[in-house]
Amino acid sequence: MSQKYLVAPDLDFIKEVRELGGDSVKKCYQCATCAVACPIAPENSPFPRKEMLATAWGLKDKVLPSADLWLCHECGDCSTLCPRGAKPGDVMSAARSMATKEYSVSPKINDLVSSSKGLPVLIGVPAVWFAILAAITLFGAEPMTKIFHAIGLEWSHAHGNELAHANFVSTWLVDLTFVPLLGLIVVAFFFSLKRFLFDMHDNAVLEGKTDKAELDLKAFAQSIINVIPTILRHDKFNECGENRDRTTVHMMVLFSFISLFVVTNIFFVTMYGFGIPGPYSQLNPVKWLGNIAGVTLIIGALLMIKNRLTKEDAVNAYKDWYILGLVLILGVTGLGAEMSRLADAKFVTYAIYYVHLIAIFNLFAFLPFSKMSHLVYRVVAMSYADYANRK
């Protein structure tokens, strides 16, 4: 016997989806072309037809907890073939932005990241913070040296008179900022994803998209391992037809970030574990990896921006431009700070490094709230689909 469902439209949900780029949702007349055209939709209850209907009716509780929302890779095949121009891919993208806000530990921070009105705060807070840290480093070297000597540590991580960014903002202060921040990010994601995962399972059980009555976290963890190769190879992107060229660009940016994360951690261990501070030789192979990753990141970001600018019917929300601009600034200031340091341009390299720190803060502090968080949610959703035997 089928379950009864009381339809309770959420008009604010419809309004916000439209504002985030899904303004074409009401054009859908349920012809099912999108569900047939999608090369990666499961055979059982395929997307995005049902999501288009539920979104148009304002059924927020049906849309946001669904794993299918994240199995969509916004190929564009459905939008291209839609006879009504309803653009299902754009509607799904807008709904995903709504989902990150719904599961966010702080919807207010999510609103700051989602609107240009919040940009002064996103820039101003880290700008003031790192200005204070720079002042401590530049004018408080003597007392800080005494304090660190008292606990058996060296305050300065610079080599003699060599130009180093640590002389502008102490490496200690930088790491004492970002390490706790990383911990807060992990905690924020934990609470958001925990609720998302259990809601996703309840939704799948309710709609008959899984044969698993209970959520087995151990088996789910194995599913995460199962899907990692699929994600790294971008297998789902390669099944797309309309925007398959995005595969290479996305892989460039993804592997750049992975490489830079590895480089950062190697040098972190080198400095604090082995007591060997930077700057490090340009002949160091780890340094080579970092430089190559930095260049690749810049090229990838520029290609992403080019793709959005040249695609006439593309829907570009502020959130898209914020993250693309941030990625580009990270790459440019990272390499710029290094090149100007090698050129012995003291004030130039300090200024570029200051902007770089602000960009890094934006990337990390607002990761659970920006579009970059979509990567994390998508990994969880794809892992759940693997666990739930959703084919």
Image (tube, rainbow, N blue to C red):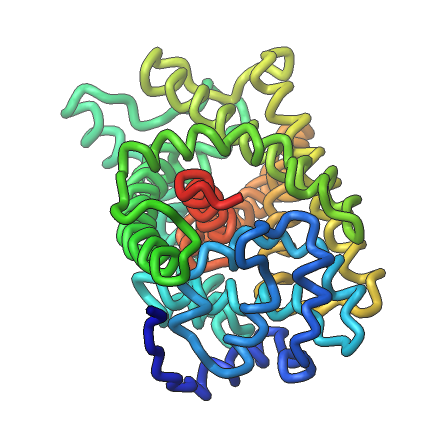
Instruction: Give x and y (percent) for residue 312.
Output: 84, 68
* The furthest residue to the front: 1
Residue 83 seen from this side:
yes
Q: Which quarter of the figure is the N terminus placed in?
A: bottom left
* The furthest residue to the left: 150
Q: Quadrant of residue 200?
A: bottom left
Q: Residue at x 72, y 39 (%)?
A: 238
Q: Residue at x 36, y 70 (%)?
A: 2
Residue 318 seen from this side:
no
Q: On screen, 302 above or below 222?
A: below
Q: Residue at x 32, y 65 (%)?
A: 106
Q: On screen, 274 above or below 23?
A: above
Residue 324 vs residue 105: left or right?
right
Between 243 and 374, the one lying in front of the other is 243
Instruction: Give x and y (percent) for residue 148.
Output: 22, 28
Between 272 and 350, the one lying in front of the other is 272
Between 7 and 14, the one lying in front of the other is 7
Q: On screen, 140 above or below 373?
A: above
Q: How many marks?
A: 0
Instruction: Give x and y (percent) for residue 327.
Output: 61, 48
Q: Residue at x 52, y 68 (%)?
A: 95
Residue 177 vs residue 47: left or right?
left
Instruction: Give x and y (percent) for residue 180.
Output: 28, 42
